[in-house]
Image (cartoon, grey):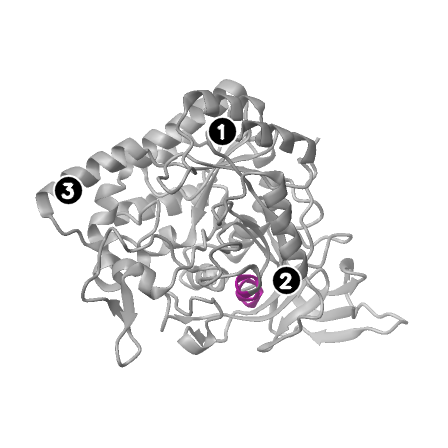
């Protein structure tokens, strides 16, 4: 593996932006200083006019392996991730079979070790009847990012709705507990009522069915369990204004036992966009009316929401009742069905560029983007030696050109599903280079896949 000096680069880190050189040696950041010169072999990278950020850590992705590799794999989606400046990911357990046991979890780690271009960790899944596996994870809390509870899901046996099971998980798990919060009973009642009234449902009905109350009731329940047992709770993909009353900015992040995440699609889209994007933006929890988006932005900026992620969830267009017309434009199938259109959208390649778009719009500072996408994720999960540009830390780094435009086109999308809801969107910034563990895995449109990513480790007592 080569060593590098990045010369004359604008380093954005820990609330500041400084001009300096940075030396990468033996996978790590060895030195940050002015005018670094060395007496050993090193490759030099000209950083003039570029910004150097810590690599993005995405704490919520679905890479679909094993069992669903017709739509994605750890290899394809990690490649898309590093193309977008994401150097580490934490992947969800709802694969086939679900990662409900340590044997199945370790199989995923073995696959990632062989194929992932980014660093990786995997959540252990929860069900109503795998409590013993959850408690065994306490002995591996430095090796596993967390346990995941679907508190609103009707897919297979992923839904954990048994109060006794929930009490055992919240009282017994020493790991971070990440929750998908939507109340299934509310969703079912809303669906049945709307279906009886309308008959055929359409994309814009999604936030009516998976409404604010469904989200709040479930998030409130998760927070109550966490407060009762002192659990470490992380509520994923906040989508409503009402949920924000459950979280605080009165404590420093390192003292919080309950944290929250916003996803890029809930910051970018609103219910007004269903008319143009149809089932492209169908996801759970649903994208809701614009007042919720505005509230999420405010909470992100004032510290009630701690991190930004993607919930990257690829499906084939056909699985979302979509197709391409003769011009290549994504549109609904003539027989499009609300019930059959899968929920989820692919985002991991473009999340950083999308947030940089909002930097250009004056919505958020570059330093705050770095805080929410790198620093705070590392702090929330206690990731070891990553998420910051510090001497001694792994060189997970991304160089961005803030002034070079790039249009999202079908031919430059790397997701295996081969589409994006951001097609033909023009970003104001471009990912120039991505380093993973000091290895230049992507630069100027070229990948070097000779080294793979590494397993994330965690500083937990």
* Residue pointed to by mark 1: 129
**Residue 5's spot in the image, x, y percent?**
76, 69
Q: Which corner quadrant of the image does residue 164 belong to?
A: top left
| Between 297 and 35, the one nearer to me in the picture | 297
Measure the alpha-carbon separation of dots 1 and 3: 33 Å
Choose top left, top right, bottom left or bottom right for residue 156.
top left
Instruction: Give the secondary structure at mark 1.
Output: loop
Q: Residue at x 78, y 52 (%)?
A: 392
Q: Is residue 242 visible?
A: no
Q: Which label sits in the foreground, 1 or 2?
A: 1
How dense is the environment of label 3, judged by Cα within 10 Å: few (below 14), some, or many (20 and up)? some
The residues colored magenta run 76-83
Q: Nearer the viewer, mark 1 or mark 3?
A: 1
Circle 2: is it few (<14), some (14-19), or many (20+) Cα within 10 Å?
Answer: some
* Residue occupied by mark 2: 115
State whether the magenta stretch is mostly helix, strand or loop.
helix
Which badge, 1 or 3, comes first in the chain's sequence?
1
Q: Is residue 78 magenta?
A: yes
| Residue sitting nearer the eye, 155 or 236 | 155
Residue placed at 39% from the left, 57% from the top?
345
Does residue 282 belong to the magenta stretch? no
* Residue 365 position in % (x across, y down): 49, 55
**Of the numbered discs in the image, which one, if any, rests on residue 194?**
3
Q: Where the N terminus falls, by quadrant?
A: bottom right
Q: CA distance from mark 2 to mark 3?
A: 45 Å
Tell me if I can see residue 111 in this picture.
Answer: yes
Which is more foreground, mark 2 or mark 3? 2
Instruction: Specify which label sits upstream in the sequence, 1 or 2.
Output: 2
- Say above or below: 177 vs 318: above
Quadrant in which the C terminus is drawn: top right
Q: Give how far apart the Cα atoms at labels 1 and 2 are.
A: 31 Å
């Amino acid at each position: 593996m080569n060593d590098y000096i990045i010369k004359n680069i604008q380093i954005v880190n820990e609330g500041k932006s400084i001009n300096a050189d940075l030396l990468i040696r033996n996978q790590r950041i060895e030195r940050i200083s002015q005018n670094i010169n060395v007496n050993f072999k090193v490759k030099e990278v000209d950083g003039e006019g570029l910004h150097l950020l810590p690599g993005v850590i995405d704490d919520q992705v679905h890479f679909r392996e094993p069992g669903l590799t017709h739509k994605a794999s750890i290899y394809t989606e990690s490649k898309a991730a590093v193309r977008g400046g994401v150097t580490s990911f934490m992947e969800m357990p709802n694969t086939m079979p679900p990662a409900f046991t340590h044997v199945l979890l370790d199989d995923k780690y073995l696959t990632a070790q062989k194929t992932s271009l980014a660093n990786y960790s995997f959540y252990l899944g929860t069900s109503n009847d795998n409590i013993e596996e959850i408690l065994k994870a306490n002995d591996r809390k430095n090796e596993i990012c967390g346990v995941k509870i679907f508190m609103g899901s009707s897919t297979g046996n992923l839904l954990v709705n048994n109060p006794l099971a929930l009490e055992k998980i919240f009282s017994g798990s020493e790991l971070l507990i990440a929750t998908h919060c939507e109340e299934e009973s509310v969703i079912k009642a809303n669906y049945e009522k709307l279906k009886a009234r309308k008959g055929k449902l359409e994309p814009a009905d999604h936030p009516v069915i998976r409404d604010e109350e469904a989200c709040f009731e479930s998030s409130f329940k998760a927070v109550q369990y966490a407060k009762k047992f002192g659990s470490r709770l992380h509520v994923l993909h906040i989508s409503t204004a009402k949920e924000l009353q459950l979280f605080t900015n009165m404590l420093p992040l390192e003292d919080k036992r309950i944290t929250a995440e916003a996803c890029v699609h809930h910051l970018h889209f609103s219910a007004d966009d269903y008319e143009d994007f149809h089932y492209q933006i169908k996801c759970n929890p649903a994208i809701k009316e614009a007042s919720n988006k505005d509230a999420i932005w405010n909470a992100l900026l004032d510290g009630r929401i701690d991190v930004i992620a993607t919930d990257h969830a690829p499906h084939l267009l056909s699985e979302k009742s979509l197709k391409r017309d003769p011009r290549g434009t994504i549109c609904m199938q003539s027989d499009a069905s609300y019930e059959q259109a899968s929920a989820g959208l692919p985002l991991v390649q473009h999340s950083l560029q999308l947030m940089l778009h909002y930097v250009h719009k004056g919505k958020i500072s570059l330093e705050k983007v770095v805080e929410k996408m790198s620093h705070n994720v590392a702090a929330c999960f206690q990731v070891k030696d990553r998420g910051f540009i510090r001497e001694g830390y792994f060189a997970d780094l991304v160089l961005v050109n803030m002034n070079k435009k790039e249009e999202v086109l079908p031919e430059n999308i790397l997701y295996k599903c081969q589409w994006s809801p951001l097609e033909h969107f023009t970003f104001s910034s471009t990912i120039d280079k991505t380093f993973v563990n000091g290895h230049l895995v992507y630069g100027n449109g070229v990948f070097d896949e000779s080294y793979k990513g590494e397993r994330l480790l965690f500083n937990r007592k």
